Image: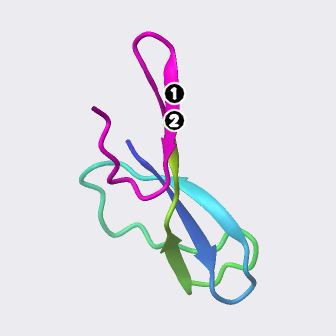
Amino acid sequence: MPIYSYECKDCGEKFDMLVGVGTGGEELKCKKCNSKRVQKVPTTFSFTINGGSSGSCPTGTCNLD
């Protein structure tokens, strides 16, 4: 299950949410102020390649070759 990051448009709170595949209908709300005005925000990820090399991919579309 992927983890998505969100930001509340009312209070600015940032939070992560684990989202199951095939889930639908769960209403997103800010964990701080309960506002429904939340927006998914871009995130980065890091990786390790066999042999110990590592890096990051801020856009999520990086070539891992």
Q: In this view, does 48 lie above or below 46?
A: above
**Residue 10 on image: x %, y %:** 69, 89
**Marks 2 & 1, CB-CB < 8 Å contact:** yes
Q: Residue at x 51, y 27 (%)?
A: 54
> Residue type at mark 1?
Ser
Q: Give the range drawn in magenta.
A: 47-65
Q: In this view, does 61 lie above or below 56?
A: below
> Residue type at mark 2?
Gly
**Residue 38 on image: x %, y %:** 55, 80
Q: Does the magenta stretch include residue 63?
A: yes
Tell me if 64 is positioned left or right of 55 in this view. Answer: left
What residue is shown with label 1? 54
Q: Which residue is drawn at 73% across and 73% down?
A: 13
Which quadrant, please, contains the N terminus? Answer: top left
How packed mark 2 is, by other alpha carbons closer than 10 Å (few <14, some 14-19, many 20 or more), is few
What residue is shown with label 2? 55
Tell me if 24 is positioned left or right of 10 in this view. Answer: left
Q: Which residue is drawn at 75% across and 72% down?
A: 32
Q: Residue at x 44, y 10 (%)?
A: 51
Q: What element carries label 1?
A: strand
Q: Which numbered tag is attached to residue 62?
A: none
Q: How far apart, in angstroms, are the residues tagged by discs 2 and 1?
A: 4 Å
Q: Does the magenta stretch include residue 31?
A: no
**Residue 26 on image: x %, y %:** 41, 66
How packed mark 1 is, by other alpha carbons closer than 10 Å (few <14, some 14-19, many 20 or more), is few
Q: Residue furthest left?
A: 22
Q: Which residue lies furthest to the top in this view?
A: 51
Tell me if 57 is positioned left or right of 31 in this view. Answer: left
Q: How many labels does the image show?
A: 2
Q: Nearer the viewer, residue 62 or 35?
A: 62
Q: What element carries label 2?
A: strand
Tell me if 52 is positioned left or right of 7 in this view. Answer: left
